[in-house]
Image (tube, rainbow, N blue to C red):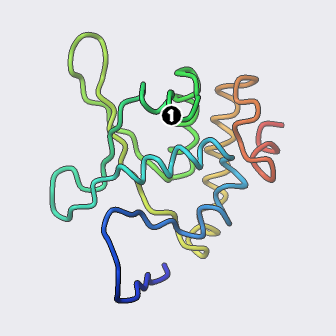
């Protein structure tokens, strides 16, 4: 992983780092919407070390679909794409009323070497997602490499 350097001067908190590997390595497989969704989850990730919720993100699905003009039926597909790529792990906690509360454990992207070592497993996971959703996965996977997985 690369080190982040912030010059002294007028700095502020309240920002998220975006690793280059996300666009260089993952985006060609996972596509635009999954990348945007991941960045949104990353922005809401709890980064306080040592807490029970460290690394977890939760943001209402209603606000997410409204903010990015997604449909509720698209979110489970994006969840599966992000899980198959290893960028998130999803935890579901029963809260009654027939719905689970969804927590996303948001992982940093692998560095280039780790990604290449894991690429075959990830592509197989994405193939499984493509088969699960068949025609509904449509244009959600990446145009460069992802669409080839559903062929």
Place of residue 118 in the rendered image (x, y in percent of width and height, measured from the top left): 59, 62
At horizontal 32% and vertical 39% (from top left) the residue drawn is: 58
Instruction: Report crowding for label 1: few under 14, some 14 to 19, many 20 or more residues within 10 A (C-alpha).
Output: few
Place of residue 75 in the rendered image (x, y in percent of width and height, measured from the top left): 53, 29
Place of residue 91 in the rendered image (x, y in percent of width and height, measured from the top left): 33, 37
Quarter residue 135 falls in: top right
At horizontal 42% and vertical 57% (from top left) the residue drawn is: 107
Image position of 74 (left or right of 49): right
User: Looking at the image, which residue sits at the far left?
Assistant: 51
User: Looking at the image, which residue sits at the far top?
Assistant: 97
Image position of 120 (left or right of 65): right
Q: For numbered disc 1, what is the local secondary structure?
A: helix
At horizontal 32% and vertical 72% (from top left) the residue drawn is: 12
**Relative to residue 15, is residue 125 depicted above or below?**
above
**Relative to residue 141, is residue 92 depicted above or below?**
above
Q: Nearer the viewer, residue 93 or 24?
A: 24
Count numbered badges in the picture.
1
**Relative to residue 71, is residue 147 depicted above or below?**
below
Query: Badge 1 is on which residue?
Result: 67
**Relative to residue 68, is residue 15 depicted above or below?**
below
User: Looking at the image, which residue sits at the far bottom?
Assistant: 8
Q: Quadrant of the C terminus?
A: top right
Place of residue 36 in the rendered image (x, y in percent of width and height, measured from the top left): 57, 47
């Amino acid at each position: 992983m690369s080190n982040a350097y912030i010059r002294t001067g007028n700095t502020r908190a309240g920002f998220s780092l975006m690793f280059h590997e996300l666009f260089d390595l993952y985006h060609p497989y996972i596509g635009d919407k999954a990348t945007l969704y991941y960045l949104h989850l990353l922005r809401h990730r709890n980064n306080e070390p040592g807490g029970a919720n460290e690394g977890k993100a939760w943001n209402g699905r209603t606000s997410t679909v409204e903010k990015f003009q997604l449909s509720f039926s698209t979110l489970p597909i994006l969840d599966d794409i992000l899980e198959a790529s290893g960028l998130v792990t999803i935890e579901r906690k029963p809260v009654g009323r027939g719905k689970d509360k969804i927590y996303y454990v948001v992982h940093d992207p692998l560095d280039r070497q780790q990604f290449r070592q894991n690429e075959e497993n990830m592509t197989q996971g994405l193939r499984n997602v493509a088969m699960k959703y068949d025609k509904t996965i449509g244009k959600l996977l990446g145009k460069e490499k992802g669409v080839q997985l559903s062929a």
